[in-house]
Image (cartoon, grey):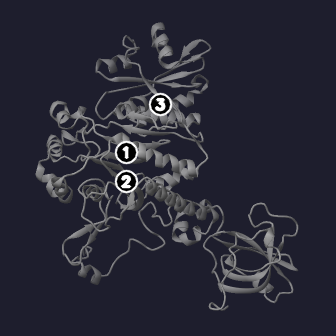
Amino acid sequence: MSYQQEALRTHTCGALRESDAGQAVRLMGWVGRVRDFGQLTFLDLRDHHGITQVVVPSQRSFQAQVKELRPESVVAIGGKVQLREGGANKNHVTGAVEVVADTFHVESESEILPFPVTDNPKSEGEEARLKYRFLDLRTERMQRNIAFRSDVIAHIRKTMVSKGFREFQTPILTSSSPEGARDFLVPSRLNPGHCYALPQAPQQFKQIIMCSGFDRYFQIAPCFRDEDPRADRSPGDFYQLDVEMSFVTQDEVLSTVEDVIADVFRTFSDRSFQNDVFPRIAYRDAMLRFGSDKPDLRYSLEMCSAEEALAQSTFKVFQGTLSEGGLIRCIKVPGGAAQSRKFFDQLDAAAKAAGLGGLPYASLKEGEWKGSVAKFLSEKERGDLTSRLSLQEGDAVVFVTGKDDHKYTTLKAGGKVRSKIAELLGLGHEKEWAFCWIVDYPLYEWNEDEDKIDFSHNPFSMPQGGMEALSKQEPLEVLAYQYDLVCNGVELSSGAIRNHRQDIMKKAFALAGYDESVVESKFPALWNAFRFGAPPHGGIAPGIDRIVMLLLDEPNIREVIMFPLNQKAQDLMMGAPSEVSDEQLSELSLLRKRAAD
């Protein structure tokens, strides 16, 4: 085949239609199925754009060669388009036509495949899929997922620019951060004994950009964190929509980002929205109602206060909890009275696994109260619970009891019970988007290990009330301008209005036991930038991978990343991480650790 005289192909394998009948074409692609019918041999030719059926008559000298083709070989076909005999194949956009081959050339022959390249790569083990990722990516599903991701990112970029944001690239080699996850370190050859760090996020850079006079920044930013993998988190690198804005309030940041995210989900999904405007839920309210700051709002199952209704209870568990100033929360289980004893045993096991002593319950069936605590409930208590929970015939109620502390230990356990109820009842699968903002996070929490006040979320967030709040309120009562974006129980992002005032920052760190020198030494560039006029600013960074994962309804984030690491943070295809030579280590002034004799 000549690479100089003519184009390698006139059409893609997804381009031909009935209107192309009679036209001479050239196609190139990978060999799919080969079907031999004696006089005619049929070949499915595939590329990124689709599949075209090729017909090779017995008169062609190359028919025998076609019959022996291994799947995934790359071939070139020349021939004429004709209407497909025997009716169209509605599974392909090219299904109304086929190409009768006149010329044939094997461009690159495939060896025997390690696994079949099918439309359902999940049938293969993950190790094989990651080692031969280039084969896995050829499947229709993975081609669709990765192309979809590209389209989402392109749409986000266009939307951000239309809102007056500019995209700036921040450094990849930077200094190590003393907070957050572990850094990936890069030894410096020119500065022996010193290391760069790959950025966990462009946090300091984007704040310095605001101090530099650019007031609307965004970036599809690569981030690097050495942390344990999860189904919704990549163990090495990931991408986020990094956003920062100057001269804005929290409401302005939330409304701007909400518009962008809602637009993406409406553009790339036909699911409905539970609310046109994302509800804003205070962190404490989220914990009291759902036992989580990442609530799945597609179902209710809210925890309600039962301390007042059960204040005079004769049940020892309730009595003991209330005497110690603890919590009693109750959750209505719709239709729970019809559930078996096994159902409640499973809930009880989930409660104990979450750290509770157990899970008392009662149900209303055929006008009677039954269950483990039914006999301890007075008529008044039953009436109060019925009114408080809007109980109806056939419903049940479970009780979450435990201590009341700043870490919300009992409420978090209740949240796990709530999730288990939803799982057993088959809730949470509604095809809708339930977004919310979690706001009003506490600035501080109690560090039991060190017996001191510590920052709970982000030490550089602006406290609500500024200096006055830090001076007059108890530290654990101070709230911050911090917020999380949650969708269907998945956290998409965290953000904050930044503390841009050095005097407020000094006070905030002092309450947590740090003096000014700590901030100045650990974050010198940011601290220095704040010395010369810093604007009020804030931002957020929704995860691109999680957004795409939700839109595609994929359970694992590796299904939307082109070259992901495995659960051990290894790249099986490239063989990374890999050992390096003694010479390379020597250049970096490093020594290889030798095994003991």
Q: CA distance from mark 1 to mark 3?
A: 42 Å
Task: Please determine whether, in this image, residue 521 is positioned above or below residue 365.
Answer: below
The type of residue carrying mark 3 is: Asp
Q: Position of residue 413 (x, y in %)?
A: 40, 34
Q: Work out whether mark 1 precedes mark 3 in sequence or the reverse, and give the earlier one.
A: 1
Marks 1 and 3: CB-CB under 8 Å? no
Q: Say which of 261 and 453 sits in front.
A: 261
Quarter of the view holding residue 32:
bottom right
Horizontal side, residue 534 vs residue 320: left or right:
left
CB atoms at circles 2 and 3 under 8 Å apart? Answer: no
Q: Quadrant of the C terminus?
A: bottom left
In this view, 27 is above or below 552: below
* Residue for point 47% across, 46% down: 259
Q: Point out which mark residue 355 bears.
A: none
In the displayed structure image, the side of residue 216 where residue 507 appears, left or right: left
Instruction: In the rendered view, tell whether residue 252 sits above or below residue 151.
Output: above
Q: Residue 414 occupies which quadrant of the picture? A: top left
Q: Is residue 349 visible?
A: no
- Percent coordinates x, y for residue 52 in the rendering: 74, 71
The amino acid marked with disc number 2 is Val
Residue sitting nearer the eye, 374 or 88: 88
Label located before the other in sequence (2 or 3): 2
Kind of residue sitting beneath label 1:
Val
Alpha carbons under labels 1 and 2: distance apart: 9 Å
Res. 255 visible in picture: yes
Across and down, in percent, residue 131 comes to 51, 70
* Tag 1–tag 2 contact (CB < 8 Å): yes
Identify the residue under disc 3. 348
Q: Which residue is disc 2 drawn over? A: 243
**160 or 380: which is nearer to us?**
160
Residue that numbered label 1 is attached to? 253
* Residue at image coords 24%, 49%: 535
